[in-house]
């Protein structure tokens, strides 16, 4: 009956859900509760009913450790802002982290949900929390080049001087955008160096086109604000001018203990580049493409979502793409070959019969 409750939650059948309300805290093999299912299907009325009935808004699924609020922000189902408002009325723990160490605010910044960021910040909780790679929500927003979200976070005292696990600051991440670089400088960002001794100017040099004019507009903003970095040498003794259009790493490789994210339906997927991960500012373009891909994957996953009871889903064999696209294999034996084989068989038995007849006559 517990799976019937999930069916009711996903279909918005409040009357049926009331009959099975004793299963309100049930989680299937994937860790999904009725509230998770209702959110994924965009069932606003069901979400409100379940929350008022005492559903635990902090339950996390097993695939990515997503709470109901994280799921809302990542999938953005129909009426997701209204769903988010309902969830926030029931005292969710916004400091909870998913399997990658990200909070709900990280996801709101990642998916550039400005209204979602506003709602989360209105909770008055301290959400300036780093993820497993020491990325704060502000650094994520800078990487997405979303000045509006960065401004919102700064108004809530989110540190502009935060650095990721490789020492990259907001300015390191921001050099991909002239507007972002100018904005960060105006807000007091400093031109610090990362673990390789690279300043934001080094990062801009590495991402610039060797055939284009140097300094770029971004480089000029940095040089005007921080003239001392013009001659600053990194750990390899190179200035930014010597790295223009180069391939030298802007950050160190991720520690072996760091768990890489993979591109899949679970989630927050992540392509090969110089650092073999997506941590460096030189990979911002890749990260943006990744985010778009993740959104498409989540959209497809939502459309595919089935209300088959959890006990039955393991019996359903998914169709592999190659199987769906491959035409049936044709019979390679031609009709004339088959006729010849039949004739040979008949002749063989005729010869045997003749031999038996001859033996009998003797």
Image (cartoon, rainbow, N blue to C red):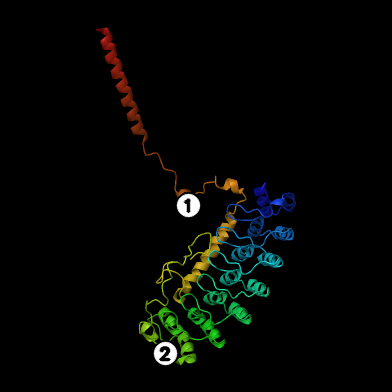
Residue 254 is situated, as x and y percent measured from the top left of the image, at 43, 70
Mark 1 nearby-residue class (10 Å; few <14, some 14–19, many ≥20): few
- Say above or below: 57 vs 225: above
Residue 206 is situated, as x and y percent measured from the top left of the image, at 41, 79
Q: Please, which residue is most extreme toward the left here? A: 362
Tell how many labels: 2
The quarter of the picture where residue 152 lies is bottom right
Q: Please, which residue is most extreme toward the front here? A: 257
Q: Nearer the viewer, residue 3 or 175?
A: 3
Look at discs 2 and 1 and give the one toward the viewer.
2
Q: Please, which residue is most extreme toward the top here? A: 362
Residue drawn at 45 percent across, 73 percent down: 283
* Placement of the C terminus among the 4 image quadrants: top left
Q: Is residue 118 left or right of residue 173?
A: right
- Per the image, the residue denoted by label 2 is 230
Residue 287 is situated, as x and y percent measured from the top left of the image, at 49, 70
Pick whichever of labels 2 and 1 is earlier in the sequence.
Answer: 2
- Per the image, the residue denoted by label 1 is 321
Q: Is residue 265 left or right of residue 22?
A: left
């Amino acid at each position: 009956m517990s799976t019937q409750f999930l069916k009711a939650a996903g279909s918005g059948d409040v009357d049926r859900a009331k009959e099975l309300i004793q299963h309100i805290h049930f989680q299937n093999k994937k860790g999904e509760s009725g509230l998770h299912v209702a959110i994924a299907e965009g069932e606003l009325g069901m979400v409100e009913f379940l929350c008022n009935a005492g559903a635990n808004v902090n339950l996390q699924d097993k695939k990515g450790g997503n709470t109901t609020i994280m799921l809302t922000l990542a999938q953005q189902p129909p009426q997701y802002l209204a769903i988010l408002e309902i969830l926030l009325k029931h005292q969710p723990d916004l400091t909870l982290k998913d399997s990658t160490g990200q909070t709900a605010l990280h996801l709101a910044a990642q998916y550039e949900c400005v209204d979602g960021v506003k709602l989360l910040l209105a909770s008055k909780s301290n959400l300036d929390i780093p993820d497993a790679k020491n990325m704060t929500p502000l650094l994520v927003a800078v990487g997405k080049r979303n000045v509006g979200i960065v401004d919102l976070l700064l108004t809530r005292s989110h540190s502009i001087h935060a650095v990721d696990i490789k020492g990259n600051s907001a300015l390191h991440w921001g050099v991909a955008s002239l507007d972002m670089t100018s904005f960060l400088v105006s807000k007091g960002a400093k031109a610090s160096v990362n673990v390789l001794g690279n300043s934001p100017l080094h990062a801009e040099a590495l991402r610039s086109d060797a055939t284009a004019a140097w300094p770029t507009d971004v480089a000029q903003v940095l040089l005007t604000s921080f003239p001392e970095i013009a001659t600053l040498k990194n750990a390899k003794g190179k200035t930014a001018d010597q790295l223009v259009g180069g391939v030298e790493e802007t950050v160190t490789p991720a520690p072996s203990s760091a768990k890489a994210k993979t591109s899949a339906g679970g989630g927050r997927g992540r392509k090969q580049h110089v650092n073999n991960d997506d941590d460096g500012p030189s990979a911002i373009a890749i990260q943006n493409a990744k985010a778009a891909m993740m959104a498409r994957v989540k959209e497809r996953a939502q459309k595919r979502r089935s209300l088959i009871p959890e006990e039955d889903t393991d019996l359903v064999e998914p169709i592999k793409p190659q199987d769906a696209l491959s035409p049936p294999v044709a019979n390679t034996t031609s009709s004339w070959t088959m006729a010849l084989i039949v004739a040979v068989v008949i002749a063989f038995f005729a010869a045997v019969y003749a031999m038996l007849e001859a033996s009998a006559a003797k």
